[in-house]
Amino acid sequence: MGGDPARLPAWWPTPAQLGLASGRRPSDERRLAFPVHPLTVGRPLEAALRAAGLDGEARLADRPLLDVRPTLSMRTVAVADDPLVHLKLPLTTSTLGMRNRRSVKPGTLIDGEVAQRLVEAVIAREPRFGATVLLADETTHLHAGHELLATLVRRYPPGLENATVVPLAGLLAPAPDGTLVIDGLAERHYSGDVLALLDDYLTLLFDFHTALFAYGIALESHQQNISLVFESGGANGGAVPRLRLLIKDHDGPRVHAIRLAAMVGGGPAADLCGFDDRRILTSGDGPVADVFTTITVHLCAAAPVFELARLGRAPLDTLLRRLRDRLTDAVDRLAVTRPGAAAALLRRRVLDADRLPVKAMVTAGTLFTKERSGAADINKHYVTGPNYLLRGSGR
């Protein structure tokens, strides 16, 4: 068993609570309750237990105990009596490509914890983000030697009881009254001004991710992994409502180790880079810029902008100009606060490039073999497309 059971929540069930009375065998005292996704019960779970050498040891509980609720992620459930705790459980399904399985390998749990601590270290050095960027705690996890026998215990930060937390993926979803979710949020927090909300979001998004880029870091925080946190004016002394970002699912970044070392020192950088998947560490800026572009720019910024335009909220060129302006502001700010190559690189590879990288996950994950596509990582295999940021730029 990998992981630290001592970190588990106090309510974590004991085998006795699940109907597996202790004392049947001497080893019962050492048993640990291990949650599995209901959709893996049956042949997938039986095969996983055999492969891990646990088919004679592990037993299904006689009864369920915890009530959970579904979340945006098909692998993740929220604990009903402790809603700030989510359990991420592996599945046998594949999404965005046949070989892109929704299982959980031991290394990804380690990498998520390492990446979290890395970003925490950057935030500690960039204190303006201490009040505006929140990270889910993903340092508690268990693994039993098979990709279907794993659990991530995700804890959301305290103090969200009176906040409105909305995943970016749901921001433009229809609300029950026929409007959009963003309309209700804008009415409540921005006097009905959807574009002012968008502007604040883009400003914070790009400020944070360009700062990470200066440290050689790009996160795979797409629309499902980033949430907007809104607080009413009364919650912060009557000031303008504060918008924060909440980030989860920390595994899968790209880190340029040399750039990180230049920012924090070689020793600290080495301590912060204990990743299991060595593909995370890169020898150049290119892979980091690719993740910044395909995740932060395409998915977190451009996707909602294109959808707002499709819905008729504003002309596309107007919205793209706003997106470009906010990214330009962030890059200009970076050039002042962190002089060096990072700002120039973002201008060259993102703002002013003729073409931008585009994910080709279905191609790499289903249509082609890895030998044919050359993909070292299905999630980070790219083609290119025209740079929509140049619309309205004068070029």
Image (cartoon, rainbow, N blue to C red):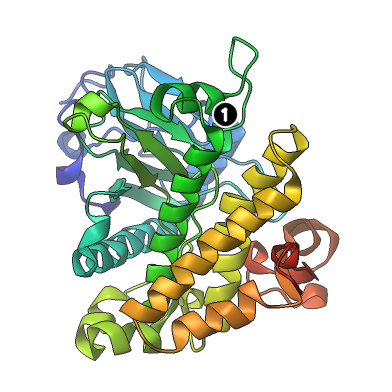
Residue drawn at the location 63% of the way across and 72% of the way down = 351
Q: Give the x, y percent position of residue 128.
A: 24, 59
Above or below, 309 against 323 in this view is: above
Residue situated furthest top in the rendering? 177
Residue drawn at the location 24% of the way across and 39% of the way down = 157
Q: Which residue is mark 1?
A: 39
Residue 14 visible from this viewpoint: no
**Amino acid type indicated by mark 1:** Leu
75 or 360: nearer the eye?
A: 360
351 or 23: nearer the eye?
A: 351
Residue drawn at the location 77% of the way across and 37% of the way down = 310
Residue drawn at the location 17% of the way across and 44% of the way down = 7
Above or below, 160 against 47 in this view is: above
Q: Give the x, y percent position of residue 202.
A: 49, 52
383 or 51: nearer the eye?
A: 383
Residue 146 visible from this viewpoint: yes
